[in-house]
Image (tube, helix red, strand yellow):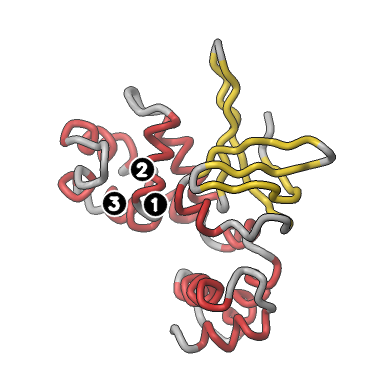
Amino acid sequence: MIERLRGILVQKTPLLAVLECGGVGYGVNVSARTGEMLPSEGSEAVLLTHLVVREDSMTLYGFLDIQEKELFLNMIEISGIGPKMAQRILSSISPNDFLSLIATENAAGLSKIKGIGKKTSEMLVLALKDKALAISATAGESSTAALPFAEQEAILALHTLGVKDPGARRAVEKAAEILGRGADSGKLIAEALRHL
């Protein structure tokens, strides 16, 4: 199984990334959220992956962090929810917001996501409510590993200043959005402090 890819991002579209690793270009399906957070083409990128093997295809799905991957894996175990629907759900809502809706058993909120009806939203709540807390817990420190190095450094610096997650991560993500994905950790920290 291909669990992780690290290489040069040679092409990206909103829902597909092509990572060149050791001379091989891997086409990886990503959520719109992951697609937005990828660095510019020509930069190094790391994606956690899951390979879906079917009789007529092999499709690779990619994720920026363990939380998004865990959610995806749990969703595709539910009858009636395939990888494409799981990818569409993750494109429409952040993992934290999705988990909040599950934890509060807000089926009405889930049914507002494009492509999810009342029956599917109730099924999601039923299947994932016990797992929501465990998936949230996997997000902590391990989720920073998929971020660019400068962003990881900035988050750790905020931790030493006493800022806890998810606030530290959100502030750094906002800073990276404003300054661009190539910004160094010093600039990211200064900008992130303005968004706490």
Task: Looking at the image, tell me whether mark 1 or mark 3 is earlier in sequence order.
Answer: 3
Quarter assignment of residue 161: bottom right
Where residue 104 appears, x then y in whole percent?
Answer: 23, 53
Residue on which disc 2 sits: 89
**Amino acid bearing label 2:** Ile
Label 3 close to label 2 by CB (< 8 Å): no
Foreground residue among 10 and 51: 10
Task: Check the image and report above or below for 193 versus 182.
Answer: below
The residue at the point 60 percent across, 29 percent down is 51
Secondary structure, mark 1, is helix
Label 1 close to label 3 by CB (< 8 Å): yes
Where residue 66 appears, x then y in whole percent?
Answer: 55, 49
The residue at the point 60 percent across, 84 percent down is 189
Residue on which disc 3 sits: 103
Secondary structure, mark 3, is helix
Residue on which disc 1 sits: 133
